[in-house]
Image (cartoon, rainbow, N blue to C red):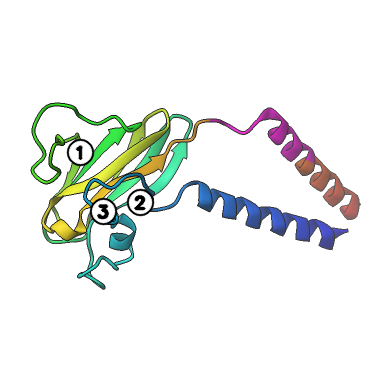
């Protein structure tokens, strides 16, 4: 009986890990392409950016999310500065300072990292997602277009929590019975 419960626990843990990894990729999801080139956030993270294989470069990582928020880690391991722009739920600026790199666009609020090996963790509040792009900095070919990081939009349903609770009670009862 214990072996069966152990196998069930391992299968559930693997499934939980696999589905959580699919739900929130560590480097986000590319959502559009106004640069006419693939987003390089994931390539920057893996040190595989075209023309810069093996070199450190700026990137953003998913840290965690909760209902109505997402926490991101901004990284700049490069000697030059990096300005990461962000927007909430796909809504960008429609006026203000013209963007010097993205024609017809405007500079959005952002995070500036100008010290090598600098990181900054920041939590954003949004309804569905926070999008980040790197469109200003030392190297143009490290730029990446809007990359989405999803916000959790719901908590587990009560039925799921009830089922988990009954499972834990059952395991506790089984452990007590075996002990006695």
Residue at image coords 13%, 26%: 95
Secondary structure found at label 2? strand
The answer to which of marks 1 and 2 sits earlier in the sequence is: 2
Q: Nearer the viewer, residue 141 or 171?
A: 141
**Quadrant location of the N terminus in the rendered image:** bottom right
Mark 1 → mark 2, Cα distance in angstroms: 15 Å
Residue at image coords 85%, 44%: 173
Which residue is labeled 2 in the image?
A: 61
In the rendered structure, find residue 110 and report the number of the disc placed on it. Answer: 1
Which residue is labeled 3 in the image?
A: 75
With respect to residue 35, does 164 lie above or below? above
Give neighbour class at mark 1: few <14, some 14-19, many 20+ (Cα, 10 Å).
some
Which span of residues is magenta-colored? 154-166
Give neighbour class at mark 2: few <14, some 14-19, many 20+ (Cα, 10 Å).
some
> How far from the left and from the top, in percent, is residue 93?
20, 29
Secondary structure found at label 3? strand
Whether residue 111 is visible to the viewer of this picture, yes or no, is yes
Mark 1 → mark 3, Cα distance in angstroms: 13 Å
Quadrant hosting residue 133: top left
The answer to which of marks 3 and 2 sits earlier in the sequence is: 2
The answer to which of marks 1 and 3 sits earlier in the sequence is: 3
């Amino acid at each position: 009986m214990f072996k069966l419960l152990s196998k069930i626990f391992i299968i559930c843990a693997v499934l939980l890990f696999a589905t959580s990894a699919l739900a929130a990729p560590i480097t986000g999801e590319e959502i559009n392409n106004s640069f006419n080139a693939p987003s390089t956030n994931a390539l920057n993270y893996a040190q595989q950016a075209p023309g810069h294989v093996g070199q450190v470069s700026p990137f953003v990582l998913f840290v965690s999310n909760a209902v109505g928020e997402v926490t991101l880690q901004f990284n700049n391991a490069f000697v030059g500065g990096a300005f990461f722009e962000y927007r909430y739920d796909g809504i960008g600026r429609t006026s203000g300072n013209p963007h010097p790199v993205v024609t017809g666009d405007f500079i959005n609020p952002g995070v500036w990292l100008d010290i090598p090996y600098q990181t900054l963790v920041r939590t954003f509040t949004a309804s569905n997602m926070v999008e980040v792009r790197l469109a200003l900095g030392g190297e143009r070919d490290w730029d990446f277009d809007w990359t989405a990081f999803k916000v959790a939009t719901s908590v587990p349903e009560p039925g799921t929590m009830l089922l988990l609770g009954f499972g834990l009670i059952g395991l506790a009862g089984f452990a007590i019975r075996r002990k006695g």
